[in-house]
Amino acid sequence: MAGHSGTPGRSVTSRALGILDAFDSAAPRLSLSEIAERSGTPLATAHRLLGELADWGALIRRPDGRYEIGRKLWDLGLLAPVQMELRQVAAPFLQDLHTTIRDTVHLAVREGLQALYVERISGRESVPIVSQVGSRLPLHATGVGKVLLAAAPPEVVELALRSPARQTRHTLVEPGRLRRELTEVRRRQYARTSEEMSAGAASLAVPVQVERRGGPVVVAALGIVVPPHRRDLPRLVPVLQVAARGIGRELARAHDFH
């Protein structure tokens, strides 16, 4: 992690970057004292810089006093070639999928132990939607998250299942049950949830894979959010898979995914 040095004479820019670098996938939310310690910044200086970074939008101060990365950095991150390419490639497939099923469609990638939503098209149903473009939700409680977690390295799975938080009374938090579900997700190549992230919403998701020399690699997850009473979710799996394969094919042609 950068920014640990307390070397005198560090510039304001260096200290601000050190504060941002204190955050990582294992520590997405930090207190003032934690940030000061992890960045090697004096407490008073960290407090001042945190205020400025929060005012600019790089950080968000939560009600509990801890800080997390803000939307402004996400907006800048969308300008990165890979993120821009993923969204641009996926856009027509997401639009076609939305036109076909008329439900909320979203695309997510894994960022540490969270699903980062990179695109979303809202549906017509009055279903409670907690995902937004740029939002991060836990892997174990969302359809796209379970797809991404099923494809993640073993060490990531271990961390995610160490103490999964209960989002609703329906959230699976028992490590044994989650492991079995991830095995099933890998076998059938899709994930389903029902009111695990929010009451009144179910989800269905499939992996977006790119063919590489060593075999297919999951680079994203494509999902939909529907009312929990929907009985035709199995029928929608092939529809999502067709769209996901189309995105994967187009990504494979792009330079950054060879």
Image: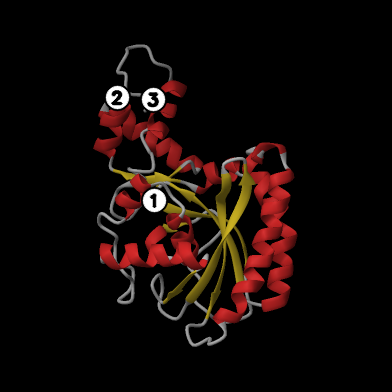
Q: Residues within 10 Å of mark 1 (few under 14, many from 20)?
A: many
Could you say whether the residue bearing mark 3 is in a helix, strand or loop?
Answer: loop
Q: Identify the mark nearer the N-term, 2 or 3.
A: 3
User: For this rendering, which residue is in front, 235 or 107?
Assistant: 235
Q: Distance between the residues labelled 2 and 1?
A: 25 Å
Question: Residue at coordinates 54% horizontally, 67% vertically from top-left?
Answer: 205
Q: How far apart are marks 1 and 3 (CA)?
A: 21 Å
Q: Residues within 10 Å of mark 2 (few under 14, many from 20)?
A: many
Q: Identify the mark nearer the N-term, 1 or 3.
A: 3
Circles 2 and 1, Cβ within 8 Å, touching? The answer is no
Q: Which amino acid does label 1 sit on?
A: Leu
Q: Mark 2 points at which residue?
A: 40
Q: Which amino acid does label 2 sit on?
A: Gly
Q: How many labels does the image show?
A: 3
Indicate the position of residue 118 as horizontal and vertical percent values: 58, 54
Q: Name the residue under label 1.
A: 113
Q: In this view, does 10 lie above or below 93?
A: above
Residue 59 shows in the view: yes
Circles 1 and 3, Cβ within 8 Å, touching? The answer is no
Could you say whether the residue bearing mark 2 is in a helix, strand or loop?
Answer: loop
Q: What residue type is labelled 3?
A: Ala
State which mark lies toward you, 2 or 1: 1
Question: Residue at coordinates 72% horizontally, 66% vertically from top-left?
Answer: 95
Could you say whether the residue bearing mark 1 is in a helix, strand or loop?
Answer: loop
Q: Mark 3 points at which residue?
A: 2
